[in-house]
Image (tube, coloured by chain):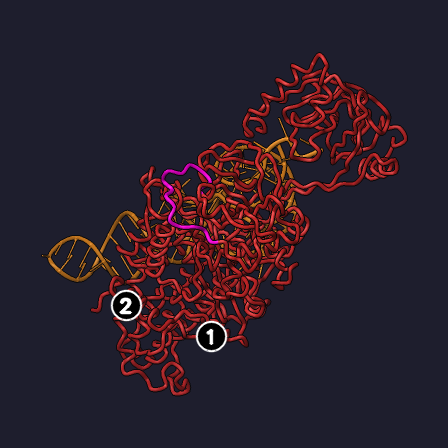
Chain colours: A red, B orange
Amino acid sequence: MNEYNPKELEPKWQAYWQEHNFHRTGDAPDRAKYYVLEMFPYPSGKLHMGHMRVYSIGDVLARFLRMRGFNVLHPMGWDAFGLPAENAAMEHGVDPAEWTDSNIAAMKAQQNALGLSYDWERELTTCYPDYYRWNQWIFLLFYHQGLAYKKKAPVNWCPRCVTVLANEQVESGLCWRCSSEVSPRELDQWFLKITDYSDRLLDDLKLLDGWPQRVKIMQENWIGRSYGADITFTVKETGDEMPVFTTRPDTLFGVTYMVLAPEHPLVEKLTRGTPREEEIREFVQKMSRESEIARTSAETEKVGLFTGAHAINPVNGEEVPILVGNYVLMSYGSGAVMGVPAHDQRDFLFARKYQLPIRVVINPPDKDLTLQPLEAAYEDPGMMVNSGSFNGMDNEEGKKALTAWLAQRGQGANRVMYRLRDWLISRQRYWGTPIPIIYCARCGTVPVPEEDLPVVLPTGLNLSRIQQSPLKEMESFMHTTCPRCGQEARRETDTMDTFFCSSWYYMRFVDPQCDQAPFRREPGDYWLPVDQYIGGIEHAVLHLLYSRFFTKFLYDQGLVQIQEPFQRLLAQGMVYKDGAKMSKSKGNVVTPDEIIEKYGADTGRLFILFASPPEKDLDWSDRGVEGCHRFLRRAWRLFQLHIGLFQPLPPEGRQGNMDAQPEPGPAELELRRAMHAAIKKVTYDIEERFNFNTAISAIMELVNSIYGYFNLAEEEAVERHRIFLGEVLETVIVLLAPFAPHLCEELWHQCGRRESVHRESWPSYDAAALKVEEVEVVVQVNGKVRGHIQVAADLSEDELLEAAREHERVKSYLQGKEVVKTITVPQKLVNIVVR
RNA sequence: GCCGAAGUGGCGGAACCGGCAGACGCACGUGACUCAAAAUCACGCGGGCUAUGCCCGUGGGGGUUCGACUCCCCCCUUCGGCACCA
């Protein structure tokens, strides 16, 4: 028998598809479009199992949707700027561009070996000038709208990467890329004003029904909006105003002290020339040396020092001490907080440590907290006490009333505060998009005029001897003339964060060769948004937040009609082996190459989709892979055994005249039912739930049913029902085609078909064929299964109940009991409740 | 600490709206084929018991219901996010 040999047939069909430019995106503006996109990779040179998983998911969807009749856009590109290329250059003296290009070639070959159906005509590579010039163009658009600006600020510095990082790129004090400890550094840097979009980024999460809840919650937390009030205290000794932000203006009467961040400008002013000056200065210096994690860790003990100065509470004129504290952050709010120990647990512990007074101003409904010392802060709602004219008011109302009272006197206002910071996009590295800015001694900061774009990244540097900011060393790049006055000027030498590239690449795919704009309106209006985006959860905040920001900005600029870039998002789980992430050090790495070599791409694709639902983590199992390979061989063998059914092919093919077919017997009816059940389940599982694992198991069941049929069927019956059986076998190929594209293409052609199976339209199921004459119904007594009955499917409830009562064992359970109640679920169950 | 997700056979997982828990696959066992093995095909496969049947069983405890993996309350464990955010 003809053996299943993926090593031979996979390259054969890959070549065929390539030759016929098979996966080119169609021009069919009249057809419904569907844009499937997997997060494009960094060209590291090798595919890993995480890649294989995300591409397999995307490819099944793309192939399925094409068969469903959609005009599908399924492109691939390269997130090609970034540190590894530069580091390779520094370590091995290779050219980053060449290094990147050869990696791309290698990964592309691997992707093709997986049988992925990309439209390579739309391939894009972010490190090529024809892409990154539009980064610069978009940057200038931000700049002209006042949304790109430069400021001196304390920023996150990664010593290993020798550059700064955006807040999103620091994970609990460590660099997201290399896990080095990040330290603060004061630098003049470019920022994008993402905070202007805080509310829209937060509120529009509601529009994203097709996103996993957890991703939306992570973004919500990251933006961190909280409603409260600004309240202005006054420093008694100097008369300085001292604003604080609080979410609990209702507790203002409970303030017993104030705390300033060590970096707060008032600290020095209040202590200068006082006996405490030396002590405080030492404390502040110690704080500024301490790393961010050490200072902001929840475990770190709160430390406070009295400045000697006092603040006047605007609501009652009370004087309270002002302290400096390690736990107050200059970067949030005003860098000063009011201490209300009775109603904030942190303040409570702090006050107890330093013997500061604790004053209850909110009472719970059932208790008077003022009678005895508190054990812990009371943070829940209640009624205001010890609060002058506000006494007796509900505290929620009190928030509004007190803020209004303060506002009237110019000492407070409602305020919405966010955790989100502006996006720091400068990087002190070489392999990135040059920021198109020129500094002129006379004209100041001058944007590069649009017609001068792109500002090309110089090539041919010897990076091995350069420590940082290579462009600073490149005289010919640095020196230029001012576009305004023509005088000598110098260029900005920082490059852009690579997340800039990935924030809009999905838009470029709609018009990748456009040289007049990032992309034209019409293809954008047709293709955008991405209908289904697929990628790792690690970008829940980073890339996915930045992309949403870009989309909203470009919407405001009239470049796109959409407000959200990704209609549906699938955050796929990680690939583990033996309970641990695959890693060289653990020696548990399995590569796509090995799998393709040993079993073929179809087996690998099938396993990675079968082992687990896509959004869950997957545990790699070599045995499981073999099981999937066995299934493909089993399917293959089924066709080899019965290939005779297709030869000679009936002239009408599958669309043949059904009337001419013989009446199906019970076995054929059962097989037909199994086939339509499989069509229904596979369609539903792919389309509605992305549960490829259960879709595949449904195909397996169908194959099992077909084996079962042939095992029992007479030769003569097989001959008689050959058209029907051919149809069943072909349905297997069609259903399996998105998962195992090579094998199915081969079998399809072996069946005598000339067109590709991937051009076949997806079958629809016949509800009538799913109907059964007889069903098995469960009979319960008091909710416990006591028997099964075979009954006609269309039995009435009364008849069903009657049949259930007739069941021998059920009868014995009913003996001498009183029937209290009966429940019948047609075609499923009867429950008889007795006493 | 706060927020979120998840806990089901020896393993990966299934069970859509509250209706036979364990589909499908792996592992394992039995049989067929074979001189034999592999491959393949067929069958079996949660646990217990006084076994034609009965009892227990979806992290633990309670509840709602004729009936709960599924809904409600409390708790435990694991993973993820945020982490002194005022």
Q: Quadrant of the N terminus of chain A?
A: bottom left
Give the spatial CA distance, label 2 vs label 1: 38 Å
Region rendered in magenta: A456-470
Q: Residue furthest top?
A: A275
Classed neighbour count for the residue bearing mark 2: other residues with Cα under 10 Å, few (<14), some (14–19), many (≥20): few
Locate residue A772, reporting x and y percent: 47, 71
Q: Is residue A575 visible?
A: yes
Disc 1: which chain? A
Locate residue A482, reporting x and y percent: 57, 50
Above or below A333: residue A484? below
Do the residues indicated by labels 2 and 1 lie within the same chain of the protein?
yes
B36 and A136: which one is in front?
A: A136
The three-letter amino acid code for the residue at tag 1 is Ala
Above or below B41: residue A171? above
Main secondary-structure element of the magenta-colored stretch: loop
The three-letter amino acid code for the residue at tag 2 is Lys
A70 and A267: which one is in front?
A: A267
Read off the residue under disc 1: A769
Report which quarter residue A116 is drawn in: bottom left
- Mark 2 or mark 1: whose residue is earlier in sequence: 2
Q: Does residue A378 appear left or right of residue B18 in this picture?
A: right
Locate residue A596, reporting x and y percent: 30, 56
Locate residue A710, reporting x and y percent: 30, 71
